[in-house]
Amino acid sequence: MVGYVLADLFSGIYHWAIDNYGCAKTPIFGTQIRLFQLHHETPWAIARQQMAKSLHVTARVLTFMVLPIVLLCSDPVLLGFVGVFVGFILFSLQIHAWAHCTKDKLPPLVVALQHCRIIVTSSKHAAHHRPPYNSNYCIVSGTWDLFLDKSKFFVALEKVFFFMLGVRPRSWTEPKSEFQK
Ligand SMILES: [Zn+2]
Ligand SMILES: [Zn+2]
């Protein structure tokens, strides 16, 4: 349960970070930053992508991160947490893709999970693709959005980064941003 809850929080923080900072040339994260930029240009395209295509790159990275823990640790509670947390982080990409599909294109189980709010719904995620483009970043269940958006957590963090490092987040340049339409 903790793994599931924290995976939603992590998905929101990670999504916010790559939506707002870095570029296609950023080491390690550049490809993903570019893919998310493309997603904001054409949000509907992700619905047509095959699951294996959207998951395989992240799956490879997560495998190498999880492998040492599995080999060095034998605590069932910790292994259970890591399995659930990493599993939801990996599938957050697919959960996000499902949030861009119409209900008639989704398997009944996915529709049921969305209906129960166990995974993020289309209507909830749609708010992320509407002005001012700086909310609803969480893409597992979306539960943390309630706290993160209401408390203006990311807005505060963006101001801290700006005053400390002089870096502006992309969301500040709306609606002229080159990728968010
Ligand atoms: Zn985004
Ligand atoms: Zn989206």
Image (cartoon, helix red, strand yellow):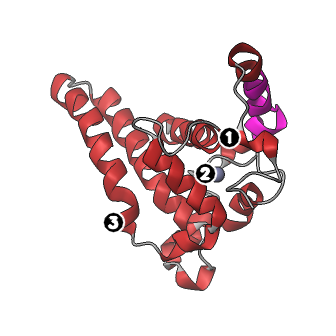
What crowding class fits label 3: few (fewer than 14 Cα within 10 Å), some (14-19), or many (20 or more)? few
Query: Which residue is identified by label 3?
Result: 52
Label pair 2/3, CB-CB below 8 angstroms: no
Q: Start and end of the magenta stretch?
A: 146-159
Query: Which residue is identified by label 2?
Result: 141
User: Which residue is at 21% across, 34% downward?
Assistant: 67
| Residue at the extreme bottom of the image, as rendered | 104
Res 119 seen here? no
Query: Which residue is identified by label 1?
Result: 144
In the image, residue 132 lies at what x, y percent?
Answer: 83, 50
In the image, residue 8 lies at what x, y percent?
Answer: 57, 43
In the image, residue 88 lies at what x, y percent?
Answer: 45, 48
What crowding class fits label 1: few (fewer than 14 Cα within 10 Å), some (14-19), or many (20 or more)? many
Q: Is residue 78 above or below residue 173?
A: above
> Marks 2 and 1, Cα distance to the nearest angstrom?
8 Å
Q: Is residue 97 above or below residue 88?
A: below
User: Which residue is at 57% across, 70% downward?
Assistant: 112
Q: Is residue 33 left or right of residue 129?
A: left
Residue type, mark 1 in image: Trp
Residue type, mark 2 in image: Ser
